[in-house]
Amino acid sequence: MKLLTHNMLTSKCIKGVSVGYPLKINASDVKETEIDFNPEFVSKMIPKLDWPVLYEAADSLGKVGDLPKNIIENFENDEDFLKKVHHIMLEVEIVNGNLICPETGRKFPINNGIPNMLLNEDEI
Amino acid sequence: MDQSNLSNQKLKKIEKKLRKLQHIVLKETGVECSINKPTNILVIANAGLINGLTEETVLEHFSIYGTIETILLIPGKSCCFIRYSDELSAIKASENHNGTLNIAQNSKPIYLLYATSLPNNEDDAINEETVPGLVIFEDFITLEEEQKLLDLCDFESNSDVSHMKNRQVKHFGYEFNYNTNNVDKNQPLTEGIPEECNFWNRLDNTAFKSFIPDQLTVNHYLPGQGIPQHVDTHSAFEDPIMTLSLRNPIVMEFKNSYKHVSVLLKPRSLAVMSGECRYNWTHGITPRKCDMVHTKTGDVSFQRDTRVSYTFRKVLRKPCECMFKTNCDSFKESIEKLRSNAPELEKEHVHKVYEKIAGHFDSTRHKPWPNVVEFLESFETGSIVVDVGCGNGKYLGLNKGVFNVGCDASLNLLDICNKKGLEIFAANCLKIPIKDNCVDGAISIAVIHHLANDERRFSALEEIARILKPGGRALVYVWAKEQEKDQEKSSYLKQYRNNKTPQAAGEASVSNLPIHVNRTQFEYEDLLVPWKLKRSNESNKSNEPNTFLRFYHVFHEDELKELCEDIENIEVIKYYYDQGNWCSIIRKY
Ligand SMILES: [Zn+2]
């Protein structure tokens, strides 16, 4: 699972959970892959991100490196910054671990890169 | 009255009238008629079924001129065809009745023309047709046995018979309620079926050999009495139902949506209604005083006389499991149950099935549909597009400029996506774990038709709408009930091979839903569609079943559109039919 996906996921679908965001990450296995860099794609994606959540996620995996805590000005023209974001958002992947609902502590297992967000009947 | 006695003025008036009627008959029936070129077919040009004209009236006035071969009263038409065996009879009838016999509406005179042929009407052939599942054993009992049965129920003096509007009735075993067409299975009568009726071993060499009825209704019909068309309630009785006719013949009418067959029931004959006849055709007796039968030499009419019938049935102790769902009360009940047990049904007939067929499913699903690809390509670089119910991922990653993420409830299908390097997560389309107002686009291709009731299908669409950003668009495909549009068959139908037979269920079904024959038109909205699994040689040795049934709700023309239009903040910007699917593009505002 990419951190870009994590940036969108919520456990609000559990009965009684009001926000369910962001999901905490407990990773046992993380990998880094290589994805073609597309500066236009990254520039367009940045405003759509919940930046603090991405930063926090990267930090919790120990992958934050020198990524700035806040989005920089004129990022469209800063290829170095765009590459860092590209790496964090698309190339860092959680292979095994858990996503955890911030309100109930419900664990959603990630196995072989696939988060299992299916709910039991008593949770809906 | 002879026409020569009519005044010239009157004759002119009749001719003028006839000329007008010639056109009307041609327009209504496509049959060319003539005023003065005789044939053996007469047309009453201004009276028919819709004016209240009956076969009986026609017979009364026209049978005295010769042998009538056919009387054709066409539903919804104001004309009637009478075919004599010879031209002379037709001429004589016309000379006597044209413009002078007052049997048209409001006792107006009828006008007669000569027709070149009978209209090409389906009903035309009714009496040559047979009713599937109806078998008649003539002389099933002897004259002596008939008398014994008649003595059992003396309708003239007996007080324990009920007098219904149209006839007298007596019950044995259980009381058959003609208002509900059902029996109270918990209220057996003290009087069982009389032992005089124990002649069932005569059916030993037939398909009905183990028939032991426990319910008997005796009906007593006087001339002019009848019984309305009805189907004996499916859940009330087993298949077959048998009727023994006593004393005098009568014509029974059998009807389904397309056909009408009149069948002569002779005294001492046993009519066995089974299968299609028992479940899908109505039967009844028209209240009238004379009947007509078709014989090789032509039609013969006869006056009715008292007829007694013994109808034997066996009470059904469980829900009906027939194949004829249209008239099946047990089936209707099970559809009602879908409302409450939808999650269970989806688990059994959607989720579990996809887990089992994932590999084979993947090998059959690689070609993306062009209109879906076009939609995906309409998103600009940097868009987020979610595939709800992504299956084997064939629509993921087609547009390289967007971030595509898929979700599905089948872990085995997700494994297949994962091996293709696609970004996915497991989720049910009713609970998408994505933030509100988050994505630029969504697709849901062939997913929502797997949800078992209307509320759930609507919720799934609302869920897609919820995750869309304002301005975001989604494309939804569902299977259409209509598999043929503008005379073009869908590719699903085109692949029909003639060797298909309904396949047995691979697993015990949680419902009583109809099982669809693949590559044929849909007869029902909610149904199970078989998936025949091709296994690799190795696993083929196992005893696991090879056929799995997937639940589908197939959508009628406007159904998806109407659901989408009911969602808040959603407009339908395009609605179309694509290869057997109804497709909707929606936008959030
Ligand atoms: Zn039935």
Image (cartoon, helix red, strand yellow):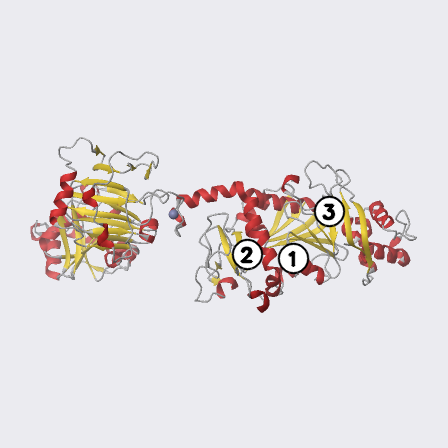
Q: Which residue is under mark 2?
A: B581
The circle drawn on residue A108 is: 3
| Residue lying farthest to the bottom in this orientation | B537
**Residue B39 spot, x, y in % from top left:** 16, 62
Q: CA distance from mark 1 to mark 2?
A: 26 Å
* Between discs 1 and 2, the one toward the N terminus: 1
* Tag 2 and tag 3, C-beta contact below 8 Å: no
| Chain hosting mark 2 | B
Q: Are marks 3 and 1 on the same chain?
A: no
Task: Using residue B85 as the reference point, say whether residue B523 is left or right of it.
Answer: right
Q: Are marks 2 and 3 on the same chain?
A: no
B156 is higher (above) or lower (below) than B532: above
Q: Secondary structure under badge 2?
A: strand
A104 is higher (above) or lower (below) than B423: above
Which quadrant of the view contains residue B539?
A: bottom right
Q: Secondary structure under badge 3?
A: strand
